[in-house]
Image (cartoon, rainbow, N blue to C red):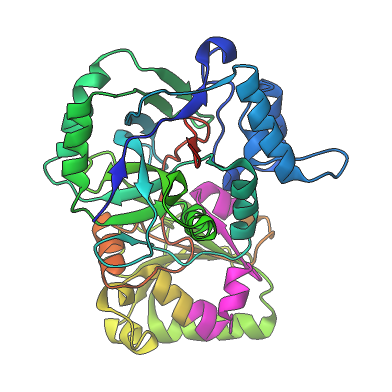
Amino acid sequence: MADVQPLRALHYNLAQTGGLQAVVSPPYDVIDAELRATLEAQSPYNVVRVDMPSTPDGTDVYQHAAALLAAWQGDGALVRDTEPAIWPLEQDYVGPDGRSRTRRGFLARVRVEDYGAGRIRPHERTHPGPKEDRLRLTRATRANLSPIFSLYSDPDQRAWSALESATREQPWAQTEDPDGTVNRLWRVADAEAIRAVQAATRDAELLIADGHHRYETARVYAQEIGGEGDHNYVLMCLVALEDPGLTVFPTHRLLSKITPERQTALRDAILQNFEITQLASVEELPPAENELLQLGYLDSFHRQPMRLTLKDFTLADAALAGRSEPYRRLDTAVTEALLLKGALGMSDDQIDHLDGLWYARDNAEAIQLVMSGQHDAALFMAPTPVRRVQAVAESGESMPPKSTYFFPKVPTGLLFNPLHA
């Protein structure tokens, strides 16, 4: 059962910062050095200064982040609400498929629990590394700086219905992401609406869509502090699985370090397991759906786009023996078993540490990186239906890393969740 609570948010003082546009940022894990510099230049209060702290003199970056957060509160750039609220969020976006949609959810705090049936489930394996960084930042700032994006089932949209009337008013704030996504945020402190949201989510199982590292950090931090208190809750953006604006896009695999021997092994594995169809153009590479377990394939030597279709599902069953049926029908899992591990001999450690493997979410980027020779080959995935993501999680398994691309991201800096009174 999900324990969803309103929060006494810490947030920007819009009168002092001139709104949210100049102070929010994308999540830390999609920010490179160039973008970080751009964000810093937008405002002395941009959240990237705290969420990805740096110091020119080599002093402790985490203590610097904590001092900066305290200083912003001291000069009034950040203020703490006196009463708890739930914050509806609408995101108008154009997906990688070119279609316009609106995704609806809400920001709240959710009690941290161990993973398990009926509570909270992950859907992907995570890479090591980021967890320690996020934990040290949490210890220093004693706050959640960025929301975790989670899904729950609400076929009748009861939670959103309780909040919808508020969204007919002017939003508390509005921002536009570099990709054109428009984010609109409202504040709802009405006790009746909050109770309705809690009733709609009380029996829900939550599925983490984005932010696994941050959730696992929140679990460790709550255990470190111990006892009851605000540290047992984490900031989340909750979206119904049935929301018409919720979509999942693919993440493509880029291969490098393909020696002649490995190229032969990869070719033999493809011939053994897949039917091959030559495509007329590279635009046809990404499969439209993954029910037939199809992949797009392009390498830097032949540069001939091809469609690979699994010859028989028994091949997947044999390669993934012992795994659940929903897992055995994932194109990312079959690709990992038959091609990455089976043909190229990659270990879990190599996959986790991106040794000979990289990812691209943009079709054109993946094609360019192969055609230019920066990577040896690309495997193009199909979108994974939300129902299959849910089925894998319900089976108690986690999908391979980067099996899904939930777009758009939820910006960092909309709200902060203090982990102390």
In which quadrant of the rendered view does residue 116 lie?
A: bottom left
> With 358 as the anchor, is 329 left or right in this view?
left
Please give left or right for residue 371 compared with residue 162 in the image: right
Picture quadrant of residue 356: bottom right
Q: Is residue 239 magenta?
A: no
Which residue sits at x=35%, y=17%? 171
Above or below, 192 relative to 197: above
Q: Residue furthest right?
A: 57
Q: Going 42% across and 25% down the picture, which residue do you hit?
A: 182
Of residues 29 and 227, the one drawn nearer to the viewer in this rendering:
227
Task: Name the quadrant of the N terminus.
Answer: bottom left
User: Please, is residue 379 above or below residue 231 in the view?
Assistant: below
x and y percentages locating residue 58 in the rendered image:
86, 45
Q: Quadrant of residue 238?
A: top left
Q: Is residue 363 magenta?
A: yes
| Residue 64: percent from left, percent from top | 74, 38
Q: Position of residue 156 (x, y in %)?
A: 11, 42
The segment highlighted magenta reads: 339-368
Q: Is residue 267 visible?
A: no
Q: Quick check: can you spot residue 418?
A: yes
Farthest-out residue, left: 156
User: 30 or 89, which is in the foreground?
Assistant: 89
